[in-house]
Image (cartoon, rainbow, N blue to C red):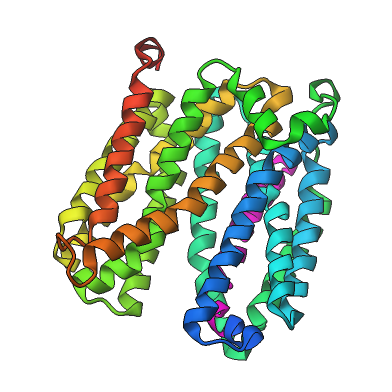
Amino acid sequence: MQSRLALAFILLTVAIDAIGIGITFPVMPELLKQVTGANISSASLWGGMLATSFAVMQFLFGPVVGNLSDRFGRRPVMLAALAVMAVDYAIMAVAGSVWLLLVGRIVAGIAAATYSTANAYIADISAPEARAKSFGYIGAAFGVGFILGPLMGGFAAELGPRAPFWLAALIAAGNLVFGLFVLPESLPDESRRPFSLRRANPFASFRAIGHLPGMRRYLIIMFFYTLAFQSYGSVWSFFGTERFGWNAWWNGLSLAAFGVCMAVVQSMGVAPAIRLWGEKRTAGYGMAVDALAFGFYGFVTSGLWALIFTPIASVAGVAGPALQGLMTNGAPDDQQGELQGVVSSVSSVAMGLAPMFMTTIFWFFTKPGAPVYAPGAPFLLAAGLMVICVAVLVADKRAMRRG
């Protein structure tokens, strides 16, 4: 019973991470206009700075927190991060200047260790053959949270632009209390290792993890996979508006439909795929489907067909958990936290770069006088990146045969 409650806490924590990101989306433009006194165009520049600062802190501190969890255990690190997150959202709720908001996002980026520590916890309590399935649950929980976040933020915004931050603080605090009662420690004393600040910087952690067999290959794949996948969040609404004439409601509906389909695939489809093909082939097949899906969106001109294709595109959702399972099974127990911190850093860099790359490409191919009118160009780039992922994955033919 306790293990089920602990798993529920982990999944709830991941969902809350995603809710905390998305819950502020509806009000951020209005809040930034309020604290800067600028117009929406200038306020958007501050929005970009806040997002970038969050990603930079994740990159710098992901390995630090991962190494701390390898030394002191997952429970204290995760609960401490939740406490910091709750206080941070409360500070942002009362922030009267953009600089205090910036400090809040910096602290939030550091405290975002809950996701990587949650992955390490899952690795601790799952048998090697079941880890990919468990990571599928993690992905599904994040997807559900990302769907709920903007909806909750939109409703809370009726009470004012500060209300979503108070709601996020209350949710994080409530989950902290829940975790204090139901979350046991997952890392036994014999699997812990001393903390080294020299090793905890991201570059030293990359070197340490990179020495593990095949891990550099997987980190390269994770970077390009995340960069490609972020094309959905970066340009989908712009693409839908330009290509199909969709309004905000249809853009939101299409993203929500994709999120629901992804959650179903990751919660119910990962385990059967792993049993049938193994982790490496499942990752490869999923990325191949992603390449085909991005190629389809690169050329599709019908909004109806884009929606009809959504369930097919979501089948590719098996790739991420399978890749995560491959990496986790390639690291010893006393490096699981370090590994997840490195994965978090790699993902945060890709997530930070994706909006800049994808929106620039979208602008270049849709601006007046564009050499070729191609609103789907970012998705064609994403398709190419997925092809690179598959090529890097299958390059090790001996590993591919081992499945």
Q: In this view, does 58 lie above or below 172?
A: above
Quadrant of residue 61 within the rendered picture: top right
Question: What residue is drawn where x is 61% and y is 66%?
Answer: 50
Question: What residue is drawn where x is 37% and y is 64%?
Answer: 255
Q: In which quarter of the image is the N terminus?
A: top right
- Of the pair 3 and 241, the residue shown nearer to us: 241
Number of numbered markers: 0
- Residue 306 in the image, given as x and y percentages of width and height: 21, 61
On screen, residue 367 versus residue 190, left or right, reads left
- Residue 129 in the image, given as x and y percentages of width and height: 53, 24
- The stretch in magenta equals 1-30
Quadrant of residue 7 within the rendered picture: top right
- State the predominant SS element of the stretch in magenta: helix
Q: Can residue 186 be seen in this view?
A: no
- Of the pair 167 and 389, the residue shown nearer to us: 389
Q: Is residue 160 above or below residue 129?
A: below
Q: Is residue 213 above or below residue 364?
A: above
- Of the pair 330 and 341, the residue shown nearer to us: 341
Q: Is residue 162 above or below residue 275?
A: below
Question: What residue is drawn where x is 40% and y is 24%?
Answer: 280
Magenta-colored stretch includes residue 16:
yes
- Of the pair 301 and 205, the residue shown nearer to us: 205
Q: Quadrant of the C terminus?
A: top left
Q: Residue furthest top?
A: 398
